[in-house]
Image (tube, helix red, strand yellow):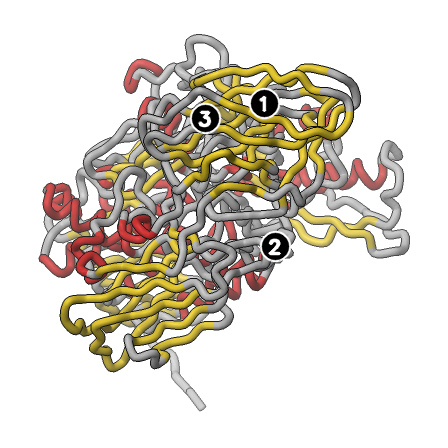
Amino acid sequence: MILEGFTTEKRKSHQITINSDLVIVGGGMAGTCAAITAAREGLSVCLVQDRPLLGGNASSEIRLWILGATSHMGNNNRWAREGGVIDELLVENLYRNPEGNPIILDTILMEKVSLEKNIKLLLNTSVYDLEKKGANQIAHVKAFCSQNSTEYELSSPLFMDASGDGILGFLGGAAFRMGAECKEEFDEQFAPDEKYGELLGHSLYFYSKDIGRPVRFIPPAYANKDISQLPRFKTFNLREDGCRLWWVEYGGRTDTILNSEDIKWELWRIIYGIWDHVKNSGEYSNVENLTLEWVGTIPGKRESRRFEGEYMMHQKDVVEQREHFDAVSFGGWALDLHPADGVYSDRPGCTQWHSKGVYQIPYRTMYSRNIQNLFLGGRLLSASHVAFGSTRVMATCAHNGQAIAMAAKLCKERGLLPADLTDQKCMKELQALLVQNGQYIPKHPFDVKSNLVGDAEIKVSSEFELLELPFDGPWKSLEFSMAQLLPVRKGEGVSAQVMIRAKVDCLLKLELRNSQKSGNFTLDNLLETLELPIKKGDHRYDIDFDFESSSQQYVALCMLQNDRIEVKCSDFRVTGIVSIFNKFNKSVATSSIQSPPSGIGIDEFEFWVPERRPEGHNLGLSLKHSLKAFTKSNLSNGMFRPTVMPNAWVASLSDKQPQLKLTWGEAKTISEIRLFFDTDFDHPMESTLMGHPESEIPFCVRSYRIRDGKGAILFAEDSNHQTINRVIFEPAVSVQELVIELDHPGKSIPAALFGLLCY
């Protein structure tokens, strides 16, 4: 029993002081991925989240799907899903939760954080004050947890603000911006005018369900009774729910921080007004049994403060895909701006303009130019309003967060501040650390020679050669133009036989295309054209292009639209090979051709996008000369996903026991092996709402064994579904030879491995 009498003095809250190597404020996807990354690198981390769950906009409190450069597979960014921890989380969510239940995602995020003993997690804890060390550093922050009535003092040499609204940067005095820059500041022709507005608003989502019997709806008194004020409601689709209702947006004309509660109330008024109209207006049929299952209680925020780093990204960084010496991450979402009036605007709910490929994000955008020990995480990234339209999405923010965490590791080890890492030597080390942990940085391979694998002689039991994609799949109508991406090496060409079914005699136009910029998959460069006379019925046809490649690259064999023709496809799937179509995903585009208005600094080009499995069959074809892009040399090129080539060693499907053997001139002591498998970086793996047809990626090797030179099994795995497998040997093993045996993941899918590292 506690019995305490009256006191004339003011009582103090319970107080706890925590010292850490890194304090992260904000437990959204950026803060969560940063915390996991830093903890795995040996840093003690204090992760402070003002909500009861992790994930931010991805959590079950808000229920937005995690997306990034893949953009619903609706742009030309092939194999562009983010790597590292965010990839691990999305792959795990697909495995456990292909239905897209946001509550299951909650459990995965909480589990991953709870398993890291170096993380001290403070939920329901809000930062409200801080103390500075001199003019330019933070000494400690003060936070309060309403659930345990405890006040925390959190000290660290390094801080990361991933709070969304930038509470640390704001309290610490860091320079920030709110609203849109004028066109002239960064020469951004897409910068919005006052009529369009300077800020993106908040959204709330809701779900409905059919309960099998009539249910009435009596709206609350605060519901908006005049739906005619909402132009977007004219196209409301009853089949839409959750974050498909992203357009239920409001607040861009006001202060999106100070007026956030008012914005929430207005969104509630809108949502309950919409539902009142659906249920009670008489304009909708078959709604008697529908009820509201869930309505969000806190808004999903898009934009508030943006903080200034040493460099500010802007429109041309995205559109021109500018390269940076300090690239540590990448983006690929569209320049996606929304009218400030949200649902009250008569304009489209968003204006999305895509770049021709992914773009680099420099490290200099990830720390404050004023507060020396403050990293900028999540949507606080140093970017103009226009560039922010692309960098703000969660998977991009998470990928950036991983880069920050690895930078914090180097800062701790060397007693440095964030800006010190822009030194050339430090930056190269940071980039190498990131890539070997799965982070993808465009045009930055890992130097495998710095690893034990670089010293080994590598032998493999077989190498897949692409000579045929068997004609064993469905017939596909050329309702849309179809292209097959094929990897060619220097000196190789494209001559193939295809199978075509035609309703009548006609002419098929064929093109061979590639991209003007190496590494892109926008088919904006025409190499050669052919016209093929087609006879009625099923026949095989030879296609012979004169093209001979001058470099390693992907080329596209394009069969142009002709709805009188069907082509025979293949059930055979292999790493780094995909078919694409000249059509569009209405979630991120309005036409198969991006046609921006003149004078806004955006490129016009065609979209060539893949289809999702179980569709997305490759074109059936028989090549006259095999393509040899799947050799063992890919295991040591330092690229762990397809880029300008597949970058994978692929075994022949006829090889009953694929294996690779590493041999050294002398015994090596090995404590860890990392294997990089193919979990299809083309698949966006939307985390919530959108279901997926599979829980495991078909290309991913599920079972394998690692043996020493005498045949003894050192490690065996029979249920893998993850991209990176880290095999730890405790104690370390001394070997002169390692043999890794892989099992093919499917009857028509050969085993593939992007690379391996030995420590």
* Nearer-N-terminus badge (2/3): 2
Between the residue at mark 2 and the residue at mark 3, the CA separation in whole angstroms equals 30 Å
Residue 724 in sight from this viewpoint: yes
Q: On residue 373, which mark appears?
A: none
Residue drawn at (22%, 53%) of the image: 448
Q: Position of residue 453 (x, y in %)?
A: 23, 60
Between the residue at mark 2 and the residue at mark 1, the CA separation in whole angstroms equals 28 Å
Image: 392 above or below 153: above
Q: Nearer the viewer, mark 2 or mark 3?
A: 3
Q: Nearer the viewer, mark 2 or mark 1?
A: 1
Which residue is outermost to the bottom?
Answer: 1
Q: On residue 522, which mark appears?
A: 3
Q: Amino acid at mark 1?
A: Ser
Between the residue at mark 1 and the residue at mark 3, the CA separation in whole angstroms equals 12 Å
Q: Nearer the viewer, mark 1 or mark 3?
A: 3
Quadrant in which the C terminus is drawn = bottom left
Q: Amino acid at mark 3?
A: Thr
Question: Tag 1: Cα neighbours inside 10 Å, few (<14), some, or many (≥20)?
Answer: many
CB atoms of marks 2 and 1 within 8 Å: no
Q: Position of residue 601 (x, y in %)?
A: 39, 15
Image: 745 above or below 79: below
Image: 33 above or below 666: above
Q: Amino acid at mark 2?
A: Gly
Task: Locate residue 263: give its quadrant.
Answer: top right
Q: Secondary structure at mark 1?
A: loop
Q: Which residue is mark 1?
A: 592
Quadrant in which the N terminus is drawn = bottom left
Q: Position of residue 44 (x, y in %)?
A: 25, 67
Q: Secondary structure at mark 2?
A: loop
Residue 167 in sight from this viewpoint: no
* Nearer-N-terminus badge (1/3): 3
Residue drawn at (61%, 41%) of the image: 617
